[in-house]
Amino acid sequence: MDSENSKLDRIVEARMKLKARFEAQIATTPSVADPKPQGKGAANRHGMPQVPVGQTVTQKWPVLDLGYQPDVGLDRWRLTIDGDVENPVVLKWADFMALPQTDDVSDFHCVTTWSKLDMAWQGVRLMDLAALVQPKETATHVICYGYDTYSTNLSLAEALKSDVLLVHTFDGNPLPKEHGGPVRMITPQLYAWKGSKWIKRIQFLPKDKLGFWEERGYSNTAYPWRNDRYS
Ligand SMILES: Nc1nc2c(c(=O)[nH]1)N[C@H]1C(S)=C(S)[C@@H](COP(=O)(O)O)O[C@H]1N2
Ligand SMILES: [Mo]
């Protein structure tokens, strides 16, 4: 018996069940359902390379926060995943790093109109964390909290997409503190405010609950290709 292997088998099995459960919903979200998302009004893509309307490509990586960048050492770092789940967990750094690791390259669209393209990340899929905690049948949304008191919410149809990661590495280096290190979330199909920096807690919920910016008039859906900026 290899207990590490059977642990992984259980994660994969739980993940496949979750995937099957949300496949139909994921398929109807704009970023999957619409091969040429046009948004409201005029054609929604411009320039070369193509970015959502109203966005400009930047080579630099601007920093946005609430005026405070929490210092979370790896020994102090914890990730709580709880709420409407069968198996709530509090992960320490070593637990988190022992989970299946995913490499991905994706774009980053900030609602303040900059986009940074082809960013190379490494981290853990939210899907894999969900498989670990096993959301109850009643779970439909998550709200994520940062160590800086930030919060932001997602439907499970968005949260379980394969490019939604909790990243610890960018371009082969540890994620810098100003960008949310040691770990932040990324949501490449949505505006970047949907990904909490310095992520501390992911709570599964039986209904939607607005996060920090969503409560202050940011769009709850946040599709950059639909120009979903404010509600
Ligand atoms: N914890 C936390 N996460 C956050 C924010 C924040 O203020 N606090 N800002 C959001 C916004 S508006 C954007 S555009 C991105 C910015 O990430 P960056 O500073 O690494 O560019 O993080 C998002 N996640
Ligand atoms: Mo943003």
Image (spheres, grey):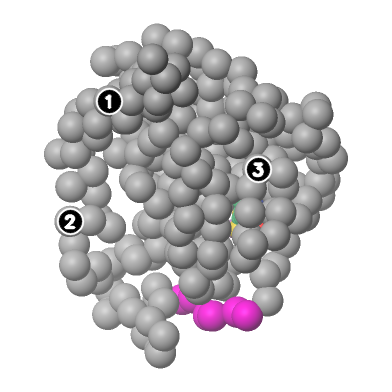
Give how far apart the Cα atoms at labels 3 and 1 are.
26 Å
Name the residue type under label 3: Val
Q: Is residue 7 visible?
A: no
Binning the other alpha carbons within 10 Å of mark 1 as few (below 14), some (14 to 19) or many (20 upward) gives: few
Q: Disc 1 designates what residue?
A: 13
Q: Position of residue 115 (x, y in %)?
A: 53, 72
Q: Position of residue 23 (x, y in %)?
A: 19, 39
Measured along the vertical axis of the image, is residue 144 above or below residue 220? above
Disc 1 residue lies near ligand 1 with CB under 8 A: no
Front position in the image: 127 or 222:
127
Front position in the image: 194 or 171:
171
Q: Secondary structure at mark 2?
A: helix
Q: Disc 3 designates what residue?
A: 183
Give how far apart the Cα atoms at labels 2 and 3 are.
30 Å
Q: Which residues are magenta?
A: 54-59
Circle number at residue 33: 2
Name the residue type under label 2: Ala
